Amino acid sequence: MADEQEIMCKLESIKEIRNKTLQMEKIKARLKAEFEALESEERHLKEYKQEMDLLLQEKMAHVEELRLIHADINVMENTIKQSENDLNKLLESTRRLHDEYKPLKEHVDALRMTLGLQRLPDLCEEEEKLSLEPACHVISKFTGMHLYVLCAKPRVGPGTPKSQNGNRMNEEMENT
């Protein structure tokens, strides 16, 4: 009976070893699956970090591009302001010259009339560009001022031929 009990004890030990080995194999398989999942997740995390780096580089490139655009806008605003100031100065200078010219021309015309000579042609009759009528209305969004700009303003229709002296105004008046 001692042999039988010893055999039963050994059989129980073998059974326990078998159960524990099966349990160990199952855990080993789960451990292997978890390790593969871990490696896969590490690869994904590495890819995510690389993508994040690329996105940050792209963001910085766009930030730099926006900074350059803002710098260009500032330069253009300053250029526009300077151009408006120059335009105002030129317009004021032109008005002063015209104010000097008008009384002088009137005086010369009066002297010519006393001598029986014809009046000199007006500026707008001589040159289309010398008209002081505001032909173009410009509104400055930067200074809020309304500027009147001297522009060439056609005095005759586009199909009117030029006379030999280059003045279409007199020729059209003669035709009417």
Image (cartoon, rainbow, N blue to C red):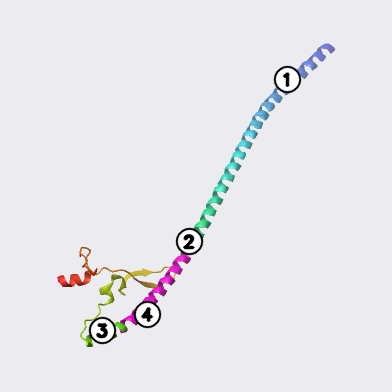
What segment carries the magenta color? Answer: 77-103
Tell me whether circle 4 and circle 2 mark residues in contact (CB < 8 Å). no
Where does label 3 land, which residue? 109
Mark 4 crowd level (few <14, some 14–19, many ≥20, 10 Å Cα):
few
The magenta stretch spans residue 93: yes
Distance of mark 2 from mark 3, alpha carbons?
52 Å
User: Mark 3 or 4 closer to N-term?
Assistant: 4
Is 56 or 4 nearer to us in this picture?
Answer: 56
The magenta stretch spans residue 98: yes
Element type at mark 2: helix
Q: Position of residue 98 (x, y in %)?
A: 34, 79
Q: Residue at 22% across / 86% down in the picture?
A: 113
Which disc number belongs to residue 52? Answer: none
Element type at mark 1: helix
Q: Position of residue 59 (x, y in %)?
A: 55, 50
Where does label 2 land, which residue? 73
Element type at mark 3: helix
Is 51 or 135 nearer to us in this picture?
Answer: 135
Q: Position of residue 41 (x, y in %)?
A: 62, 36
Distance of mark 1 from mark 2, alpha carbons?
81 Å
* Residue 1 visible in the displayed image: no
Which of pointers 4 and 2 indicates the residue nearer the eye?
4
Which of pointers 1 and 3 indicates the residue nearer the eye?
3
Where does label 4 land, which residue? 96
Residue type for callout 3? Asp
Mark 1 crowd level (few <14, some 14–19, many ≥20, 10 Å Cα):
few
Where does label 1 land, which residue? 18
Residue type for callout 4? Arg
Mark 2 crowd level (few <14, some 14–19, many ≥20, 10 Å Cα):
few
Distance of mark 1 from mark 3, alpha carbons?
132 Å
Q: On screen, 57 above or below 173?
A: above
